[in-house]
Image (cartoon, rainbow, N blue to C red):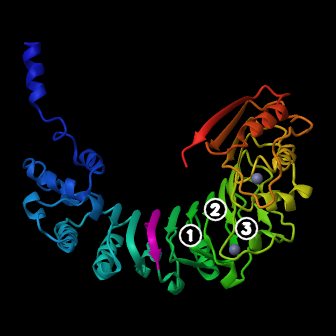
Amino acid sequence: MERARNSRRGDIDMISSLPDCLIHIIMSFLTAQEAIQTCVLSKRWKNLWATLPFLDFDLHKFKYHTELEEGVPKRNQVDMFIGFVSTALLLRKPFDLHKFCVSGLKVSHFDMMRSWILYALKHNLQVLNIDLMQECPMPPNVFNCASLVDASVAYSLKSLQNIEVINLPCLRRLSLKGAGTHITQDFVDKLFYGCPVLEFLNLEYCYRDFSSINSQSLKYLNSRTICSCRETKKRMELINTPNLLSFRDNICPYLGGQHMPLNMPSLTSASICMEKCHYNWPHKNKSSILMGLLNVQNLELSGFEIKAFLEAELSHCPEFSNAKDLSVDGLCLSCHFYRLAAFLNHFPNLEKLLLYYRGCSCKLRVPAKKTIKLAPFEGKRLRTVEVKFSKSSKYFPQVVKNLQDYTKNSRAQINMTGLSY
Ligand SMILES: [Zn+2]
Ligand SMILES: [Zn+2]
């Protein structure tokens, strides 16, 4: 009797018997096309998609009938995709749309895309994700959406300069990613004024055309932008973010060669790339970037300019007494091991050190054959030294020997792994 009941229960479609809101959560893992195709499953599923609050339209994942596929030029696939999105939004019931994603289209389809975005903005939108194939303008309404919590736009935007008012009272996360986007001071000021709870800001691959950031709410800042200092002659004057926890930036000699106040007392994690920008500025003045990173627990330094940066900064480098993890990439360890050792002396509580050695390409090569005489590292907590090296570097055995000698007083284990590039 019990077995019979169980087998009968096995016949029941468990998912169909769930309430709509739970089915919608399951459907949120599907593309919009897959979600809409569930309408053929049964009567129960016929209209479930039409109230679905999550829609993800991706041209690259868009599949159409295989019989049509042969001989159909790609343009038709784009046309079919556009027709599919427009029809879906037309037939959709007027319920909230919490998440709207569209990716793969070009500027020539922008008018269509703008009408979709406007539809989404009118339906209590919380998450907007647009991934474009080309430089496009941004519908200004996006910057005046009271419900928006998370907005992410890639590849690039043309018209951020023309945004007059930004009013996003609920926005917590904003990602603007793309080579054509100029981030001006005017935009940055309006953004922080109009987004009082913004916590996460990503400006990756945008042009840096601003000189200060002031925000009480920001916790995560990625300003690894494309430096346009040569054109704009704008230096970074201030980053005042008292609640920032994580900071990623790239600093060229022009930006770094000056007093650049960083007010980030809460910072726990920083990743700074010292790089050459479009213009080869000489390293001249001392900056105060490391002073601003005083409290970090994790620090990553990288970039071609790291040697010149450390030369300029070491004399007034602070002690990083909270730092447990340090990663250094870009310093030639065969020619400039002294420089690394002098830097490490500022990390008395270091537990883990990660070093990259990509071979020597120094103009003035310092012979690395002889053992370097250095006072050993005094940090008692160092447990792991990981060295990632390129296999072609012939000075590598000497680098390891120097590293073993230098860390002999700690009980650190030295691990080595080859880099594949
Ligand atoms: Zn620059
Ligand atoms: Zn070298």
- Please give the name of the residue rendered at 64% of the width and 43% of the height, measured from the top-left corner: 389
Q: Residue 248: percent from the left, percent from the top?
A: 65, 58
| Residue sitting at the far top | 1
Residue 288 seen in this snapshot:
yes
Q: Earlier in the sequence, mark 2 or mark 1?
A: 1
Q: What separation in Å lies between label 2 and label 1 (alpha carbons)?
A: 9 Å
Disc 1 Cβ-to-ligand 1 distance below 8 Å: no
Magenta segment, which residues?
Answer: 146-157
Q: Which residue is mark 2?
A: 217
Q: What separation in Å lies between label 2 and label 3 (alpha carbons)?
A: 13 Å
Disc 1 element: loop
Check residue 150 for magenta coloring: yes
Which mark lies nearer to you, 3 or 1? 3
- Mark 2 vs 1: CB contact within 8 A: yes
Query: Relative to 270, is 395 above or below?
Result: above
In the rendered structure, which amino acid carries the disc numbered 2? Ser
Q: Which residue is mark 3?
A: 239
In the rendered structure, which amino acid carries the disc numbered 1? Cys
In the visual, does 217 lie left or right of 110? right
Q: What separation in Å lies between label 3 and label 1 (alpha carbons)?
A: 17 Å
Q: Which secondary structure class fits the magenta region best?
A: strand
Q: In terms of image quadrants, where is residue 161?
A: bottom right
